[in-house]
Image (spheres, rainbow, N blue to C red):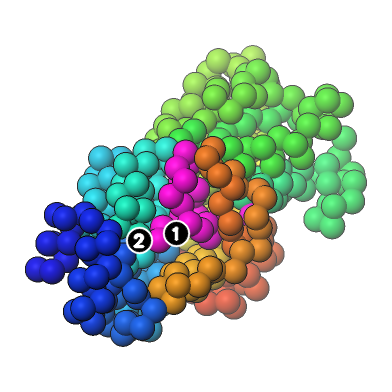
Amino acid sequence: MRRRFLAVLGGVAMAVSLAACSGEGAGGGGDTSSAKPSDLTIGVSMPTQTSERWIADGNSVKEKLQAKGYKVDLQYAGDEIPTQSQQIDQMITQGADVLVIAPIDGTALSGQLQAAAAAKIPVISYDRLIRNSPNVDFYVSFDNYKVGVAQANALLVGLGLQNKDGSKGSATGPFNVELFAGSLDDNNAHFFFNGAMDTLKPYFDAGTLKVKSGQTKIEQVAILRWQQETAQKRMEDLLTSSYNDGSKVDGVLSPFDGLSRGIITALQNAGYRGGAKKMPVITGQDAEVASVKLINDGVQSSTVFKDTRLLADQAVVAAEAFLKKEEPKANDTKAYDNGNKVVPAFLLPVQTVYKDDIKSALIDSGYLTAQEVAAGRAG
Ligand code: BGC
């Protein structure tokens, strides 16, 4: 009741004084530093449940916070921007003490963030940077530029142009490759693509890699909302428009396992399987179980593994720091300018997984079981 009242008032001074009097959780601006965890609520806003990683992220953050006694309001927005805005509005009016947000569209939440700031609710941007707002207090993510570098290197390794240790490979090319990027409204998509293109540039310049479609700008290769079906359709269109002269695709830069599966379906439907028309080298990201099976079966070449359990840990560390009225520890204070300010960040490392790494990186670490990999699905 008190919380709804506060939300209606929206007055920060009033909120602080009432919270102080009641002695329970701050609920939008009060002094959380001496409150019991069970009186504090963390709102966690995740973009979608269509991709495994966000389900794993949501569950991990929730479990880790609950294990420390906090209340958690976890919501998924079904990749709909208005739904996410509404869910965050509600978290604010219901008195969340910290918000952890993985945005669908990095630029679409400034209204919500303004309301959060007015209620003195710290905002942690989770995995994806919230853009164009001064009201983002911290960012927890992976080194997204290095994800793109890793994807480009995996493409080069798969083609034999480079060895895993970074030395020059025995292949000479030239090879036909096609490029895919993620959703333009996701800040990460740009970091992945830039990291990849910076790494591949010398090979394009030397003519070792060629993009027959000529589509090399992120605007031309981006896939809205990271949709598998859209990627499949684009790959089908590329095959029809640029490879109907008997030429073959040798490699595909794909930034996400879901897109890779769409690309693989298009290629399989066009007869790419083995022999003279063998499946191109295809990259990925997220170590989704269906794709790890494809890697194990030799269909997809690699994925970039980002351990969402570690990211959830960092989100919890940052949330607790804010609740104690401390600043979370950043390990990067330069890379993530959100268009309004540079957001202090804690970035985690990433790991490329080829077939040979599945056991050590994914199974031995308990991320997936051998049975799940064999079946290609979780559970
Ligand atoms: C994440 C990736 C994910 C993609 C699609 C990006 O923001 O960083 O891990 O593959 O969204 O969900």
Within the magenta stretch, is there residue 127?
yes
Foreground mark, 1 or 2, reads 2
Q: Is residue 12 visible to us here?
A: yes
In the rendered image, residue 313, in percent from the top left (x then y), is placed at 50, 73
Residue sitting nearer the eye, 29 or 173: 29
Element marked by disc 1: strand
Identity of the residue drawn at 50% across and 72% down:
326
Q: Is residue 277 left or right of residue 310?
A: right
In the rendered image, residue 255, in percent from the top left (x then y), is placed at 57, 43
In the rendered image, residue 234, in percent from the top left (x then y), is placed at 48, 27
Q: Is residue 113 left or right of residue 246?
A: left
Identity of the residue drawn at 65% across and 55% down:
333
**In which quadrant of the rendered image does the C terminus lie?**
bottom left
Q: How many marks?
A: 2
The disc at residue 121 is 2
Residue sitting nearer the eye, 102 or 362: 102
Residue sitting nearer the eye, 226 or 33: 33
The disc at residue 354 is none
User: In which quarter of the view is residue 200 placed?
Assistant: top right
User: In which quarter of the view is residue 11 placed?
Assistant: bottom left
280 w.r.t. 303: above or below: above
Write the start and end of the magenta stretch as one range.
122-143
**In which quadrant of the rendered image does the N terminus lie?**
bottom left
Mark 1 packing: few (<14 Cα in 10 Å), some, or many (20+)? Answer: many
Element marked by disc 2: loop
Label 1 beta carbon less than 8 Å to ligand 1: no
202 w.r.t. 124: above or below: above
The disc at residue 124 is 1
Give the amino acid type for the residue marked by disc 2 in the picture.
Ile
In the rendered image, residue 124, in percent from the top left (x then y), is placed at 45, 59
